Image (cartoon, rainbow, N blue to C red):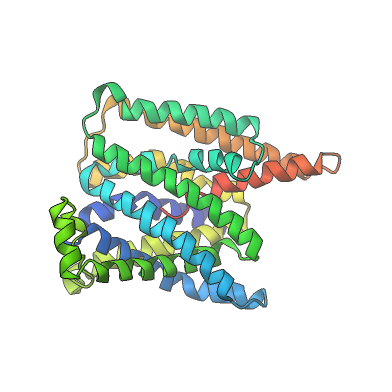
Amino acid sequence: MKKAYLYIAISTLMFSSMEIALKMAGSAFNPIQLNLIRFFIGAVILLPFALTALKQAGRKLVGADWRLFALTGFVCVIVSMSLYQLAITVDQASTVAVLFSCNPVFALLFSYLILHERLGRANLISVVISVIGLLIIVNPTHLTNGLGLVLAIGSAITFGLYSIVSRYGSVKRGLNGLTMTCFTFFAGAFELLLIAWLTKIPAIASGLKAVGLRQFAAIPILVNVNMTYFWLLFFIGVCVTGGGFAFYFLAMEQTDVSTASLVFFIKPGLAPILAALILQEKILPTTIVGIVVILIGSVVTFVGNRFRERDSAMPDGDDTADQSEKSVSQTTAVSNSKD
């Protein structure tokens, strides 16, 4: 159990420092380029673990698996993480970290709308509390950075959708979370590479510049990938994107989904503190109040998940209801795991 909490601590620190590292790299790299680099490196780091899991399961990847990875890679890396990366370039790292951490709220809503899964009382309460916290941070009556907020919330919404598609696909195809994550990263990085090549076509590049999308025109791939930025890229790709997920899944193996999910319940509180210490970002009083409210929502979810796991272990319980509750619980726990 001590190992599990060590893994949780390392994963929490890695994920909570993600926005800070990406913000620091923003001046040297195109946001889409950085997205491509970090997910490719992260996929390489996770590959040995994914191959081991496949070998233990006696499983080989087939065409249907790769079609699933192409879909999840598109939704996760191309759409959600590109919005996330762009949000970091135009808004404070602390704000993006907190807003993105609300993606489990959207995952729960998508699980209800798409998979028709029953939401437990604790999850419903958590959704309401988290939305209130989100509104406090956004403060619609005094918007100062509307674009950053739209990008961050858009990233959280699409990541919530990705979480549901990924979980449904992994269950249907019999793939564990680590394997899904690894090959989703590979597929998304490859798709992003193709898009980057397309934007280098003169006609496409000129068209993108003409409509004000200069950041998407002639996206660089290897520019500034050198020893000057080696340690920054190492931290972003190996430590945060690859290592953060690896330690999270190791923690899940040592304990349970609910305990491992502490990683994402702590992140909304820790990330703004790190941003203030390292980037000297100012945290507004309303942001602090919103963070506290969101953390309360996270605690409600965590406690509710623990009670459901306890009830599901009781032989006299309603197995069907327990299984439904457990499924929603797992969606909440893992939906934040790829930020």
In this view, the residue in front, 148 or 287, is 148
Instruction: Tell me the residue at 78%/43% (across/down).
Output: 320
Q: Residue furthest right?
A: 316
Image location of residue 188, percent across then percent down: 40, 65
Residue 121 image-quadrant placement: top right
Picture layout, residue 80 above or below residue 198:
above
Across and down, in percent, residue 170 comes to 60, 61
Q: Position of residue 146 (x, y in %)?
A: 25, 34
Q: Quadrant of residue 216?
A: bottom left
Q: Residue at x 39, y 31 (%)?
A: 134
Number of numbered discs present? 0
Image quarter where the N terminus lies is: bottom right
- Tell which of 188 and 218 is nearer to you: 218
Please say whether residue 263 is visible from this viewpoint.
no
311 over 52 or under it: above or below:
above
Among all residues in the image, which is located at the extreme top? 141
Q: Is residue 148 left or right of residue 39?
A: left
Residue at 38% x, 27% y is: 135
Residue 339 seen: yes
Q: Give the residue displayed 44% in from the left and 49% down from the top.
A: 159
**Image spot of residue 174 (x, y percent):** 65, 65
